[in-house]
Image: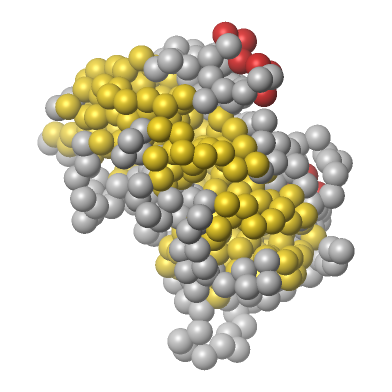
Amino acid sequence: MFIFQKKIQSIISMMAILYLTGCGSSQLSTDSIQTLDTRSPTESKLFAFYGDTQLNRILAIDVKAMELATDIPTTGVTPYTVGRAGNLDKLYAITRGSQSIDVIDINTLKITKTIPLAHSPRSCAFNEYLGLQLVSGKDKPMSSLIDVETDEVVAVVGRNELVTPLDFGGSNATGHPMWLTPDIFALIDREKRKIELYKVEKEEGKWKVTYLSKLCTPTSAHHFIGKGIDGMDTGILIGDAPKDTFYLVTEGAPQDRLSPRLSEVKLKGETLCITRTVSFGCENVEDMGSHHGTFHPDGRHVYMGSTEGKMHVIDIVNMKLEKSIITGKGSGHTTFVPQKDLAIVTNHHDTFITIVDTTTNTKIKDLNVSGESINGTILQSHTSFTDLNGDFFYAFATDNGIFYEVNLDTLEVSRTLYTGGTPKQGCSVILE
């Protein structure tokens, strides 16, 4: 049974180091924050930052203490997620209900600026080579490039039109933004079922963005599978190995009886082409759709969930569906825990997560983490993470407003924190 708690405590102003990306019903003022350092110099804290779409705030959670440190009211509305602004000590609050992004100083946990956009923001991807944050549009098939040093928009591309895509995956105009190379990025236009490529250059101190080419997709695309244990990182860092082969999730279109697919795509010069594809459907057309794919730690398999309640395991060497694991409705994101040979599957429309043995790709158990819906939104958050050692798994029971911890040795819920609201997505950061 969940233990509901609501505690507020001051936090420490410190330097923040990124750990993993992928960000109380009362509104608290950050003016009350104090400096209180009772830790040893080598001790650090793991903080989670989540966007609460219901109460228009960013939650800052001290994960080890399992306490709500503070919440930050946003200037824009509907803060869906929050992410790190490059490797700087600030966060970008992605307020999907406004044509702007709020900038939060990690040290003071105060909003320092609001960046105006030509579109409402959907998701971000950082380019360490250029120091640019790529922001895709929610209401329009557009992308903006933001200089993270100045928090200024330096370029905007795409169609300046309000659109409503009809394929599976909702009304977002674009999918996740993606850097394919240090100077080429992809804009996923979900309404037109296409992906546009753009090249970024700096000439005489000014940024220049040039349209390169487009790739038509069978249905709307959700994302290119990125790096990390949850596949959410679609940015590019200095030192990343060059790639010419990528994997793309197309969501499916129930109204057209088109099933979701995982496609292998290759970058040839300045164009993308689909080289191989595997698709899967289900008996009920209305349940035919897929949300997210993640690389298995073995590098050979991809886990790709489907809305009817299956996690499909795809062998990308042979490009074939190897097996399907019974999960829950709205089977979405997978977080791999290589230290434990586990995968944790969030089922957005069910009350339980599914825990999988990744050595055999078989289900171990379903673990209840949520009550029934009370706010009419997803039951489980899009973002989840583990501690550094892989001993604990953390996520939100979104609709119930409960942050929870799962002990990955006992595979049981070990602690919970009631925050209220509907926190959906965020990031985790180590504070030192």
Place of residue 429 in the rendered image (x, y in percent of width and height, measured from the top left): 50, 64
Left or right of 229 in this view: 130: left
- Image: 291 above or below 364: above
**Quarter residue 26 falls in:** bottom right
Place of residue 11 in the rendered image (x, y in percent of width and height, measured from the top left): 62, 73
Left or right of 137 in this view: 9: right
Is residue 221 among what the camera can see? yes
What colouring style does the render use? secondary structure
- Image: 118 above or below 101: above
Q: Nearer the viewer, residue 272 or 197?
A: 272
- Image: 380 above or below 412: above
Name the residue located 24 percent from the left edge and 52 percent from the top edge: 240
Place of residue 276 in the rendered image (x, y in percent of width and height, measured from the top left): 32, 25
Is residue 108 among what the camera can see? no
Name the residue located 35 percent from the left edge and 38 percent from the top edge: 316
Q: Nearer the viewer, residue 431 or 189?
A: 189
Number of numbered markers: 0
- Image: 120 above or below 82: above
Left or right of 403 in this view: 244: left
